Amino acid sequence: MSPDETESRGVDDNELELNTARDAKKSLAKHTHMTQLNALLLRSDCWRTPVLCRLAMTKGLVSTETRKVAWPRVVGIHEIDKSRFRNAVDLNKKTPHKDAPVVDADCARSCWAFTSSWSDEDREELRVKLKRVINAVVNVHNVQTQTQEQTRERDAKDDNGDDDASKKKTKRRSSNASKEKETENNQHHYQLIHYYQGFHDVCSVLLLVLGESRACAVAERVALFHVRDATRPDLSGYLDSLQMLPALLKRIDRELHDCVFGESPPDGFGNAINTFLFGEDEKTKNDDATRAGLRTCVFALAWGLAWHAHGLGELCGGVLIA
């Protein structure tokens, strides 16, 4: 064997040993990480949730089974009241919320990427569940649901009252009927959570990982605390947040910032986007700063709305981002 061959073989052996040591180290780190996760998930202490969040953000939750248990804990859920969401779905059947047609259209064309190997029947069943999840989340905080629950509680108290209970109940029911009718007519003005296109992408990932009941609970928390600017009556708050993107990107990666924001899009392009989102021309509005942020950051509009799930071709990528 020549000296060159001997030296080459020695280099290969050293590289093999390094790779083996590196793999062993990764395996040990993964085992340690899973041990930490399982220990945290076995404890019910609320103060351990921030530790769980840090592990989820830095090293991930590894498996679907872990995510099924960890995701509700990460968003602060310890118990799920299924009846709240069932009542919300029933309410939507009687009085659909204002975005119900959009939910129907979005769900009808959703779940393709994550269910490419599924049968049409199974995919359609998933879409029905997805629609129930979204309608439950949108309706669960509606004033009408709360009014009906309060009415039932008062009626239950009246049943244990004095001899005048039936008269009081009849009078109160008559009054409540007119109030509920007025609430039904004005329901949309008091809707706390509003649907936006892209929320169905987030909910589809939650549904596939968590199942319907847990997906409802987690999606409600996400809508209230994590994508709140998008679930308000309009997107102005979310559009405001886009203005922070140039400064953040400049701080993290100056070269990428200069590449992305080196040239501004034509004014006509920005005006067209603004007209589409706001329903009127830019000149009729005073919040020019919001539109300036939108013009330069329109490429990132869907990032926060769908958490990148819309552009992914597999569920694995969706759960990693979530």
Image (cartoon, rainbow, N blue to C red):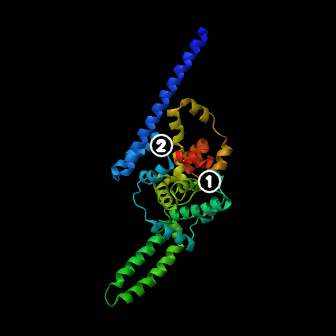
Residue 194, numbered circle: none
- Residue placed under numbered mark 2 in the picture: 60
State the residue lying farthest toward the top. 3
- Residue placed under numbered mark 1 in the picture: 277
Q: In which quadrant of the rendered view does residue 293 lie?
A: top right
Which residue is drawn at the image coordinates 50% and 58% (left, top)? 215
Q: Which of the two discs, 2 and 1, sits closer to the camera?
A: 2
Picture layout, residue 214 above or below residue 250: below
Where is residue 161 drawn, in percent x and y? Answer: 32, 85
**Residue 200 appears left or right of 59:** right
Where is residue 275 drawn, in percent x and y? Answer: 64, 52
Q: Secondary structure at mark 2?
A: loop
**Crowd around label 1: few <14 · some 14–19 · many ≥20 (10 Å):** few
Amino acid found under the numbered disc labelled 2: Gly
Where is residue 146 drawn, in percent x and y? Answer: 44, 71
Which residue is drawn at the image coordinates 57% and 72% (left, top)? 93
Which residue is drawn at the image coordinates 63% and 35% (left, top)? 263
Q: In which quadrant of the rendered view does residue 175 lie?
A: bottom left
